Image: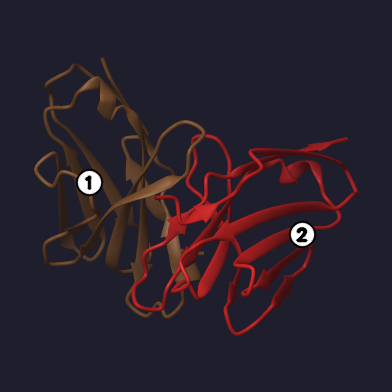
Chain colours: A red, B brown
Amino acid sequence: DQQVKQNSPSLSVQEGRISILNCDYTNSMFDYFLWYKKYPAEGPTFLISISSIKDKNEDGRFTVFLNKSAKHLSLHIVPSQPGDSAVYFCAAASSNDYKLSFGAGTTVTVRA
Amino acid sequence: GAVVSQHPSWVICKSGTSVKIECRSLDFQATTMFWYRQFPKQSLMLMATSNEGSKATYEQGVEKDKFLINHASLTLSTLTVTSAHPEDSSFYICSARGKTSGTYNEQFFGPGTRLTVL
């Protein structure tokens, strides 16, 4: 049972514009959320995280928004750059353990 | 950031053989290591959690006799795929959490191992 869902398998965006990636979760025990970036044949690298006590966290070009009532989070990348082209995974965990549940990923392509 | 390595990066083996994959934390002590599996165009699926010096905890549906995990030291965990079959072909990724890790973002991932069973 997929507890973390990324319903858009791909996203294409013009360089300089905003990329918006969405993620939904079903487990109400999740209280920590992370976004990872992954290139082919490499392991994921951490991008940004947010705990359930916040609704927004910003780090440079990356901002994550959390809507607990809707069990929804999103990642905004602005401005998008060609080097941002990768697969982005949303992950969630509960403070009961450190296990991460991942979404299926969204492939972002930034067009020059 | 902390570095986690995996060896080998690629492995091709015949059906019925066993394959061992190593996961090492290079510059920190990893009290907990996680093993994931990723099928093409799918998410990373947690297979098991391994704590140094104790038995691994397997996720539901993962055969512990099929996927042997050993976390013998604070810097090394191994995953052995026993009697591998073509359906075991996948991308296996490990991650490691350090001794003083307090937050989830301090889970560092290895580069992954591509296993192909013929």
Give the residue at mark 2.
Answer: A76
Amino acid type shown at disc 1? Gly
Assess disc 1: are there few (<14), some (14-19) or many (≥20) residues with their C-alpha within 10 Å of its C-alpha: few
In x, y percent, where is residue B63? 15, 43
- Subunit ID for the residue under disc 1: B
In x, y percent, where is residue B61? 22, 46
In x, y percent, where is residue A63? 74, 67
Seen from the viewer's position, the closer of residues A84 and A73 is A73
SS of the residue under disc 1? loop
The structure residue drawn at horizontal position 48% and vertical position 53%, both measured from the top left corner, is A102
Left or right relative to A7: residue A17: right
Assess disc 2: are there few (<14), some (14-19) or many (≥20) residues with their C-alpha within 10 Å of its C-alpha: some
Query: CA separation, marks 1 and 2?
Result: 35 Å
The structure residue drawn at horizontal position 21% and vertical position 45%, both measured from the top left corner, is B62
Where is residue B88, by image quadrant? top left
In x, y percent, where is residue B94? 35, 51
- Subunit ID for the residue under disc 2: A
Seen from the viewer's position, the closer of residues A71 and B63 is A71
Residue at the farthest left position: B65
Residue at the farthest bottom position: A53
The structure residue drawn at horizontal position 39% and vertical position 50%, both measured from the top left corner, is A1
Seen from the viewer's position, the closer of residues B74 and A33 is A33
Q: Is residue B62 above or below residue A61?
A: above
The quadrant of the image that shows the C terminus of chain A is top right
Give the residue at mark 1.
Answer: B61
SS of the residue under disc 2? strand
Q: Is residue B67 above or below residue A76?
A: above
| Mark 1 in CB contact with mark 2 (< 8 angstroms) | no
Amino acid type shown at disc 2? His
Q: Nearer the viewer, mark 1 or mark 2?
A: 1
Left or right relative to A18: residue B4: left
Left or right relative to A6: residue B98: left
